[in-house]
Amino acid sequence: MIKVITGLRRSGKSFLLFTLFVEHLRSQGITDEQIIAINLEDRDNAGLRDADKLYQEIRSRMSVPGMKYYVLLDELQYAIKKEDLKRNDRPLPVYDLLNSLIHMKNVDTYVTGSNSRFLSKDVMTEFRGRGWPIHVQPLVFSEFFEAHKGDFHTALEEYLMYGGLPFTISLKNHEDKAQYLSKVFDEVYIKDIKERYDIRNSDGMEELISIIGSSVGSLTNPQRISKTFRSVQRNLSEPTISDYLQYLQDAFLIQKADRYDVKGRKYIGTPSKYYFSDLGIRNVCLNFRQQEKSHLMENAIFNELVYRGYNIDVGVVPVNVTENGKHLKKQYEVDFVANSFSRRYYIQSALNVDTAEKLAQEQRSLINIPDGFKRVIVTENTYTPWHTEEGTLVIGLKDFLLENNSLEL
């Protein structure tokens, strides 16, 4: 199989492949001659960003017949030409390259990339079970906390502010961290998206990211976003917004959570919620304004659930109520419906449930769910996990983030 390592730029894919994995190979007795490592992001390898030339380079370095070779290709999307994307009459040349490597019994192939559309999605489709996806996220809080070596509250404040891109941990002050994140955001993420999709209205793209950053945890869709643009005397059409949102998801900057009718067991469609793969990027695109703890905490919980392998939806619970003698149908929301095979959890994110009224509010949707899957409320408090009279687990953010089996407490 081709191992396809995907993820946000600067999240550690290259370090995983070119440092950790190469060290592992050498420890197993693999020689450097057997390791064909090519970083296509490197300007020195610009001439190899053509699939045919790249293939010729790889074959030229397989000098010993029958020897086992390990081919490591970094940022493979650089070998995909824009003109090839516009053609539907044949596979992309880079896929011909990968297909050729698959059929060489003495070759083990690993590729990294920062675009889900051209790698993880297309490779899985193109090779029908011959591709193995490996997704690398920025550090989740437990990893960040281990490297931080400070107390929990200090580490959490830094994590919610600067996120989990590994290099930020080595920087010591706000100015350096903010400058690094700003540079990565402008010169890597935005530049990469603009060049790949020929985006002329880069201001509109950046404004859209700011709008999504401001609305973390809130339902939205292209129509609502378009109205927001018009309210500030700017125009960005709904189709363009839809395209931009997909580009941001393909680049792993944001992730989408669709609405799911828990009782009807069906997806509803728009509006949806969007979360940032890294909180530092979310914050730098807003110039570190709008630091609402509830939004940041909800985004951190979402990323933790993704890290643990769950597919995440936004739950909708239809309930019939009577108010002032009138029969009404209301929809209550569950922040996260986390699914993994036969497991499911209904999870609410709340700063606190310190009063009976607040606890009732957070449980309102949970107690109206008709099935027997576990219900959980995650709060900022650090008290011992406990269960309500209705059977809901209430757990502090510290235990949730640092205990791998926290949902089973």
Image (cartoon, helix red, strand yellow):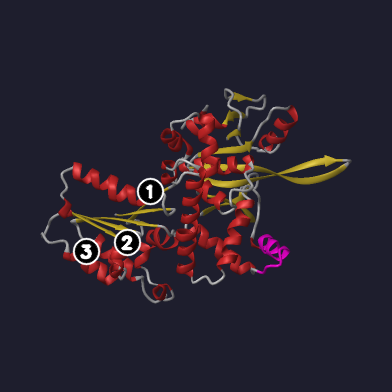
User: Circle 3 — which element?
Assistant: helix
| Residue 345 horizontal/vertical position (percent) | 56, 37
Total labels: the figure holds 3
The residue that mark 3 highlights is: 58
| Residue 195 horizontal/vertical position (percent) | 46, 68
Q: Which residue is nearer to you in this view: 123 or 194?
A: 194
| Residue 6 horizontal/vertical position (percent) | 40, 54
How far apart marks 1 and 2 lie (CA) works out to 16 Å
How far apart marks 1 and 3 lie (CA) works out to 24 Å
The residue located at (32%, 65%) in the rendering is: 43
Q: Which mark is residue 42?
A: 2
The residue that mark 1 highlights is: 12
Q: Which residue is nearer to you in this view: 96 or 55?
A: 55
The residue located at (47%, 59%) in the rendering is: 189
Q: Amino acid at mark 3?
A: Ile
Q: Quadrant of residue 107?
A: bottom left
Who comes first in sequence, dot 1 or dot 3? 1
Q: 10 Å neighbourhood of mark 1: few (<14), some, or many (≥20)?
A: some
Who comes first in sequence, dot 2 or dot 3? 2
